[in-house]
Structures are given as C-alpha cells and as structure tokens.
Amino acid sequence: MGKAKKAKLKKHQPQPYCKPAKAAQALNKAAPKPPQVSQRPTIPVSPNDRILLIGEGDFSFAYSLHYHHACTRLTATTLESRVTLLAKHPQAASHIHALELGAQKVVFSVDATKLGLPCPTGGGPAIRKVPWDHIIFNFPHVGGLTKDVNRQVRANQELLVKFLERGKALLAPGATIVVTVFEGEPYSLWNLRDLGRHVGLKVKRSLKFDAGMYEGYKHARTLGNVEGGGGWRGENRDARTYVFALESEEDLQNVKSTCKIKAHSDDEGCLEGGDD
C-alpha cells in the first residue's frame, strides 16, 4: 500500500519550471520550419504605360520591352549621337530599326542631367511635354573619368542627383523613377537611397534585377563593345532595381513649379539654342 501510494505521488509530481525564453527555444527547435518562398522579380511597368528610357546602350532593353513585353508607348534615349552610338555598338542598328518600325520613338544626344530643359541635349518637346508614368535609367555611369575611387563615386552621385531632380519634374501623378545599379562596391558607395531623399524622392520598393526576364537584352558597356567579347558580362552580375516616387501629388505640383523657375535660371549655355 505504501509503495503504491509513493508511485502514485511520483507520477503526479509537477515538471520542473522552464524559463519562457528556453521554452520558446525548445518549441522552435521542435516545430518544423516553413519552406522559404523566393519571389521572382517583377517587371515594374505595364504595357500601356508612358515609358521614358534614359542612357540606352545598344537599345536591346527598349527592344525587349516593346517586342517581348508589349510596351507600346516607349521613348528610348541615349547620350551619344547616332554616329557615335553605332560606332560603339553596331548591333544597336537592328534594335533601333525594329523600334522605329514599331512606331516607338528613339532620341539621340539626350543628357540625363538636362532632361526637359530647352536646350539641344534636353530631349525637346518629345520628352518635356509628356507626363511620364515611368522614367527608367539602367546602370547609370559616368565612365572611367579617373582611377581615384572617391572622385569617381562623387561624379556618379552628381550624375544621379541631377537626373533625379530633372526627372521628377516630368512625372505624371503616381508615377515612378526606376534606377538599376550593380550590387557591391563601388556602386553601394553611391548611397542611392540617400540621393533620392536628397531631392525629395522615397524608395517605394526595391527588387532584384533579373536580366533573364528581358529576352534579347544584353548589357552594353559605357566604353562600347570589347573586341572578342571579353570575359565581363553585366547581365550575369547581381543588380538591384530601386523604384522612386514622390510622397504625394501636392509634392508633384511643388516640384513642377520649382523646376520651371530653375529652368529659367539654369546654365546659360544650355538655354542658348533652345529646341522650340
């Protein structure tokens, strides 16, 4: 009887106290982890959007948007003249021809830092008089101006600040500016998010840039084609797309007013020989 009672008491003895943190750890270890779902990058535009492409290399990105993603309201621009561009990227000729056959606009000698200004490199009325849904600048770069990393970083930051400042004045309500850069240094030193904040833009979202989603696209280097192709393939490198937007429609109206005033007081050399 005594032994049975002892066994019964032992059976109902309370378990030792376990601290909440340890209990949670034990529970987490025991519970199976849910499978991680990787979201495939999306294309940040729609077929009917008014899209302005800045700094195109061989126009293969514009070609892909039109022929493989059915974008029909494209204006694709490049900094170079037609002659210079075709000397650097002979393959661009077929892309340009195809875009023009598809009634898409191709504009040469457009400076990203002077977008919309009344000067020869501002893009003219074709750019200034359209409220754009998306302005896209893929892999902006000033080229190899210097071997000094700090000076090179500052030069690229200046390019981006001026581009973002000019671009936001050309946006339709609810529109975005889309910038794609490579990941890692020296590109991370540009502090792209901070540059956007500096000119009154916020990052709505960022996503991995997947070159494979743009059939026919090949990354074109600033210096042009490399003889023999080289071992460098930009489309195989990790890159990230940043989608910038203004905070509100009220901000857009303020920006347009400010930029009109600034355009009149801008570089006199730009204002000479206006496009209208």
Image (spheres, rainbow, N blue to C red):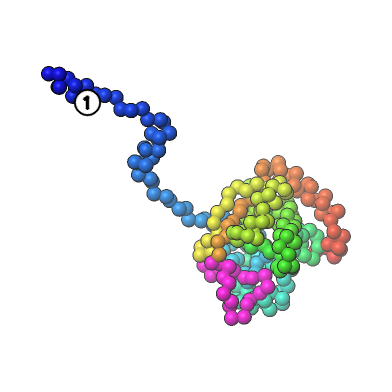
The N terminus: image quadrant = top left
Residue 37 visible at all: yes
Instruction: Residue at 18% x, 24% y: name it.
Output: 7
Q: Quadrant of residue 159?
A: bottom right
Residue furthest to the bottom: 228
Q: Which residue is mark 1?
A: 11
Would you place residue 178 above or below residue 8 in this image? below
Mark 1 residue type: Lys
Locate residue 19 relative to residue 50 in the image: left or right.
Answer: left
What's the residue at 55%, 64% (across, down)?
Answer: 237
Could you tell me which secondary element the residue under label 1 belongs to? helix
- Please provide percent x and percent y for residue 160: 71, 57
On screen, 268 above or below 2? below
- Quadrant assignment for the C terminus: bottom right
| Part of the protein shown in magenta | 215-236
Q: Is residue 232 magenta?
A: yes
Main secondary structure type of the part rendered in magenta: loop
How many marks overall? 1
Give x and y (percent) for residue 110: 73, 65
Furthest toward the front, the residue is: 2
